[in-house]
Each structure stands twice: as structure tokens, then as C-alpha cells.
Amino acid sequence: MIETAAHVAPPLRIGILGAAAIAPTAIIAPARERDDVIVTAVAAARPGAARTFARTHGVASCHVDYGALLGRDDIDLIYLATAASSHGELTCAALEAGHHVLVEKPAAMTGEEAARMTATARRTGRRVIEAFHYACHPMFHELLATVRGGEIGELVELHAEVHDPRPFTTGSVLHELRLGGGALRHAGCYPVHAMRQLTGAEPTVRSATSTLNASGADIATTAELSFGDVAATLVASFGDDGRVGNRLVAIGTRGRLEAENFIAPHLGASLAVVTADGGRREVAITGGVSYAHQLDAVVRAIRSGEALRTEGPDIVANAAAIEAILDAVGINAG
């Protein structure tokens, strides 16, 4: 008998578009923990940024032109972390060039733009996935299972807050309206997505108010929403009012579920079920860094064809929901 070596797939090759501050945490660190992934190249428009990033993080190649990176044939997946206002154009260009795309949040400025992106993915046979890392973590899987399993009864209310102090900086992709900045887009996108996942419904905006910065983007937004019969409140803030962190509370007819730091559970989190009779059950949180779980899910999806909850129609629906809230406060979503 002749023994043959088992087939081992070559590493998934990643190119980073945008030398963003989040890229080392979101891609570089989890990629280093795997032998089936390699970060091949980085491109950044800012002078010197790509070279500095490549030198700092051990990336073999760097470009000052996005097109040069997209034109390479040794890249399978683009991690896109540029300004949100450029996501639509660059995602479609990457897909047309034959690459899969993991795009940072918010994936698109409007529902219409998201629809173009996902249509391009379907036509090219490539994947576009929105980087909601929290949704890949076991904590969120447990949260979903608890709500859907009926332990707190029928879901009637949701409350979510994200407080992420970010002092205004002129020209920042987080703060400039023209670049797709604002607290709702960059912080509020998480609770919008989580509420949609928990209810299986899309929101109707009952009311929304915002405090704006000098560029016209929101420093803080509060919204009252309805997901079918489920009432919801959302607060997203970049303001420095002494509050830091994020939480989500799901209220049902027989109790409630309290989730502290559901966005980044690897930094310390808690999940508890409180029943109407006063009982309390602390849910054990397992798993590692949420970004590592995300990369694992993306690699698995690309290799096997497995569908993810953060791609396709979900990208369109989340963009449309954020757009509707911005419209309600009079901020031009596009």
C-alpha cells in the first residue's frame, strides 16, 4: 500500500486596505495565532503609513496605492479598514478583482450602497462580510440561545447603551460627517445589529435625537425603536460624561437578561438571567478574544462555503436601519 500525505490547504492570504488603528487587534494579532493565515501586504493612502505599519507588524509588502494591492494575485481576502465613506467603492473594486472582503463597520453609508456591495459579491462569486466580531463570540451565541429559548419568556423590551469616549479630532474618520463618522455609525452599529439578531425583525424608528459635533456628525444619539412588538431604546455616545462601556438588557414576560460588555467580552464581561421570582443565574462566559473567533469564522466560511450571519442581506438591513435613524434626526446618511 502506498501512503499519501493528507491534503493541506495553502494559507489564506490577507491584504490590509487602510493602516487603521484597529487593524493590529482585528487582523494582525489573531493571524499570528494561526498557521493557515498569512498577512501578505498592506496599503494606505497616508504618506509613510503603509511602510510604518508593515515594518512594525512584520508585513512583507506595502503599497501607497490601493489599486496596486487590489491588483495582486497573491491575496485571497481583503481586510478593509478605511473611512466608512469609501467602503462601498473599495469593496466593489476588491470583489471585482477577485478577492473576498472583510469590511469594518459600518460596512456602508446607506442601505442602497450596501445592496450594491452585496449584489457585486453575488455576481463575482466572492464574499463580503461585515466585521461584527462580537457576533462570533460564544457570549453572543449564549445570549441568543437564552432569549430564543424562552427562559425569560416572550421578549417585550430591549435596552442597549454604548459609551465610548472619543474626543473630537478634525479630519478623524470617526468624527467627520463627510468620512462617514459619528457615534451611531461607529458605536451604535453594534446594538442595532444585536437587537436585529435578537428579535429577527427590522426596526421602525419612533423617535431619535442627536448632539452634533462641528462637522455635523453625531457625538451622541438616542433612539426609540420598535422591532415588531418589541420596544427598544438605544444610546450611542462618543461623549466624555464619565460613562464608559456597553450593556444590553433584554426584558421578557418572565424575567430579563443582563449583558455587560457584550461587544468585547474578552476584556471582561458578565451575563445574567434574572427571573420574575427574584432568582438570578450567572451564565458562564467561555471563549477567547472576539477578533480571533471572527477570523476563525471567516476562514471557515471561505474554505467551506458556510454562511455567516454578518453577510448578504444582513449588511443591507443594518445599513438601512442606521440610515433610518440618521434620517429621523436630520443627518444626511449619504
Image (cartoon, rainbow, N blue to C red):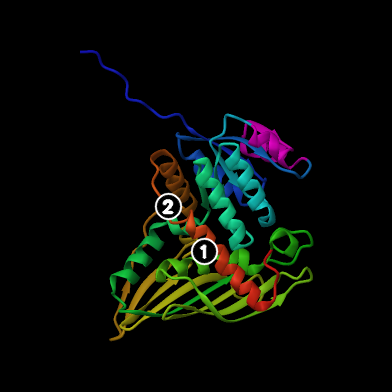
Residue at 36 percent across and 57 percent down: it is 286
What's the amino acid at mark 1? Ala
Left or right of 297? Residue 277 is left
Residue 30 in the image: state x and y as whole percent. Answer: 50, 44
Extent of the magenta region: 48-71
Foreground residue, 55 or 295?
A: 295
Of the two numbered discs 1 and 2 in the rendering, the one whose residue sits closer to the viewer: 1
Foreground residue, 88 or 237?
A: 88
Most extreme residue toward the bottom is 277
In the rendered view, tell whether residue 41 sits above or below residue 183.
above
Crowdedness near tag 2: few (<14), some (14–19) or many (≥20) residues, C-alpha within 10 Å: some
Residue at 44 percent across and 65 percent down: it is 269
Left or right of 246? Residue 152 is left
Quadrant occupied by the C terminus: bottom right
Instruction: Determine the secondary structure under disc 1.
Output: helix
Residue at 53 percent across and 41 percent down: it is 124
Instruction: Determine the secondary structure under disc 2.
Output: loop
In the rendered view, tell whether residue 172 sits above or below residue 93.
below
Query: How many marks are shown on the rendered structure?
Result: 2
Residue 149 picture quarter: bottom left
Most extreme residue toward the left is 1
Instruction: Say whether disc 1 or disc 2 marks the residue closer to the N-terminus.
Output: 2
The residue wearing badge 1 is 317
The residue wearing badge 2 is 308
What's the amino acid at mark 2? Leu
Residue 285 picture quarter: bottom left
